[in-house]
Image (cartoon, helix red, strand yellow):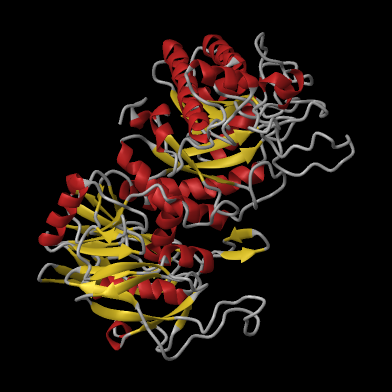
Amino acid sequence: MIGYYVDKSIIPLRQVHLDFHTSPLIKGIGSKFSKEQFQSALKKGNVQSITVFAKCHHGYCYYPTKVGTMHPELDFDLLGEMIDAAHEIGVRAPIYITAGWSEYDAETHPEWMAKRPDGSFDTAYDFNASPETPKPTNIWRTLCLNDGEYCQHIYDLTEEICKRYKKVDGIFYDIVFHGAYCTCNNCKAGMKKMGLNPAVGADVKKYYDIKHLDFTRKCNELISKYHKNATVFFNSGGAELDKPEYYPASTHYEMEDLPTAWGGYNKMAPKAKFFSTLGKYYLGMTGKFHHSWGEFGGFKPKEALKYEAANMALYGAGMSIGDQLYPDGEMDEQTYENIGYAFDYLEKTELYCYGGKYVNNLGIYYTVNNQQIYGISDMLLESQMDYRFVLNNDYSGLDAVIFPSGVVLDEKGLRALNDFIAGGGKVLLIERALLKDGKFQIDIGANYKGATTADCDYIKPTEKLLAYEELPKTPFLSYIPSLIIENKDAEVCAEIYHPLFNRTYGHYCGHKNTPYEKDGEKPPALIKKGNVAYISHNIPKIYKDNGSVFHRRYFIAALELIGYKPTLQQNFGSGGRVTVLHQADKNRYCINMTYASPIKRGNVEIIDEITPIYNIKTTFNVQNKIKRVYNPYSGKEYAFEQKDGVCTFTVDELNCHTTAVLEY
C-alpha cells in the first residue's frame, strides 16, 4: 500500500493522549503546571509517550502563536514546557492539533464552516440557543477540510509549530474524516472546476476524498520538511474498517475505541487484526474515564485498564490511554496511579505478546461491511476461535474460510477459491455471500429463489446438527427472515419454519411475533455439500443486534459441520479470548489468554472486577516437538502430552491474563 511510514521501533507501546479542551471563561490556565509534578506523574504511570496539545476544540493555542489565537488566560508556552519536560526524562511528546472542530474559528470565520446540500451547517449545534440554554455534550461546529482557506490556516499552524520546536516527535490531527461531505460555497466552486456536480452525491464524495487526501499530503510534506522522523496521524476516520481510502495518509494507526461507550470490548480485536496486515505500527486508544472523552472526575477501575492493556497486547497493539488535563495544568495523581497499574503489567507482557507471527487456521474473507465483520468476529472471539482476514485471495495456512453476506468475487478470486476448495479447504457462506445476478458463484447444492415476504421466521436444527452444539430441538426465532433457496443435492441440516402470518394491525398475535406454522413448506436454513456449507440467514447481523447465544452456537455448529477444528482448542466461557504467537527466533509458541465479563450498567459497558478461572484444558496442534510448557510469570511448569502432532496440557489459573509458553 502506498503511504507514509516511519520506523515502527521509534513508536513505544505505552502512551497517553492528553486532552486539554479548555474554555476561555476559566482563569489561571496552566498556573499550577510544574515540570517536576508533570514528570512525576509520567514516571508513576510508566508512560513512554504523551500526546500534548497545540490547539484545542475551543480554537485556542497553548503556546505563543502568530498564526492562531493563544488562550486568553494563558501567559506562557505551556506546550513547549510539556515537550521539554517529557523529553528530559526520555518520553516522546507528539503534538495535538484540532482540525475539524474549532469554535473560535467557526465564530470568527463562519464562511469556513462545513455545509450540507440544503445549505444548513454540518453540525447538531443549536444556533438559536440562548447563552443560558444547557448545551449537550460533544456538540461542536464543524469546519471544512476540503483543502480551502481553513486548511491553509492549519498548514500555517503546522509550519509554525515545526519551526518553533527543535524536536517534534509527531503530530496528531483530530476530527479529520468526520461528518457529512461538505457542499459549502468553496466546495461547490471547486467541484465545478473539476467537472463534478454538487447535486450528485457520488461527485460530492469524490471531491471530499480528493481534497481530504490533498490536505493529508500537504500536512505530511510540511512536517517531513522539518522533522523527517515525526509520526503523523489523522484521527476520526483514519483507522476505521470502512474507510480504506484514508489508510495511506498516516504513518501509523491509532484505533480510537473507548470500549465503555463506543462499541464495547469486542470492537478492538477485528480492527487490530486488520491494521496489523498493513505494515505500520498500530495501537488501541481507550480512556481513563468511566464513560468517554472529556469527563472530569470520571475514573475507570484500574483492573479494567489492566484488562484492556492485556487485551491490546493479545492482538499485538500498543496502548494509548486518554486523559484530560485540569485547566490549571496539574496532572491528576490518581489517574496516573491507575495508568501505571495497567502499564506496569503491559510492560511485563511485552516479551510474550509482541514480535512473532500469529498462528490460526480460520479466515474471514475481508469486507468493509462493518456489520458483518463485527458480528462474525464477536461469535468467534466468544468461542475462543482465533482468525485472520483473507486479503488478496490469500488462503495460505487456512483450513476454513467464512464468507460474509454481500461478498462477490471476480474471476481471479473465484479461481483462487475453487483451488482452495479443491485442495480440501472448508467454506461457510452467509446469506448473500457469493450471490451474483441471482445465482451462487460456486456450487452449494441449491438454487437461489429470492427474498422472503415473512417479517421473521424460525430455525429448526436437524438431529445431525444437534450433535455439534446445544441448540433448541424445536424451532427458535430468527429476528431477521432468511433468503429462500431450493435444495438440489445438498444435505439439509436445518429448516425454516415460517410464521402463520406477518404482524400487522389487521393480523397479529400477542405482544410480538406471530407463532410458527407447524405444517407447510419448510425451506432449507442450513445446507452442506462436501466441504461447503451455506446459511440462509444473516446470522452476523442477528447476533450483533440481538445477542442470542443460540444463534452463536448455530453459527459455530455450521463450522463444525464441515469439519473445521481450530489449531488451538479451549473453552473457558464467552468472556475468554486467546491468540497463539509463534516466536520462531526464540523457538517457542506463546498462548496468550485473557478473561473478563463486562456488564452493561446504564449506557456504559464496564469491568469492575476480574474473576479468576481455573483448570483450562488446552489442545494445540503443533508439528514441532515440544520440550517444555510453562507460565513465564510464575515459573510454573505444566505437565503436557504430545501425540500425533497434538499437544495437550492444562492451564491451572487465568486471572485477567496469562501466557503459556511452549518451547521446542
Residue 13 image position (x, y, % from top left): 42, 39
Q: In the depicted view, which residue is nearer to us: 435 or 25? A: 435
| Quarter location, residue 362 | bottom left
- Write the residue at 67% across / 12% down: 64
Q: In the depicted view, which residue is nearer to us: 238 or 185? A: 185
Residue 28 image position (x, y, % from top left): 80, 25
Q: Does residue 11 lie above or below 220 as drawn?
A: below
The answer to whether any part of residue 623 appears in the image is no
Q: In the depicted view, which residue is nearer to us: 270 or 177? A: 177
In this picture, residue 78 sits left or right of residue 304: right
Q: How many tags in the picture? A: 0
Q: In the depicted view, which residue is nearer to us: 223 or 556? A: 556
The answer to whether any part of residue 370 appears in the image is yes
Residue 398 image position (x, y, % from top left): 20, 57
> Quadrant location of the C terminus?
bottom left
| Quarter location, residue 321 | top right
In this picture, residue 594 sits left or right of residue 416: right
In this picture, residue 615 sits left or right of residue 500: left
Residue 476 image position (x, y, % from top left): 46, 82
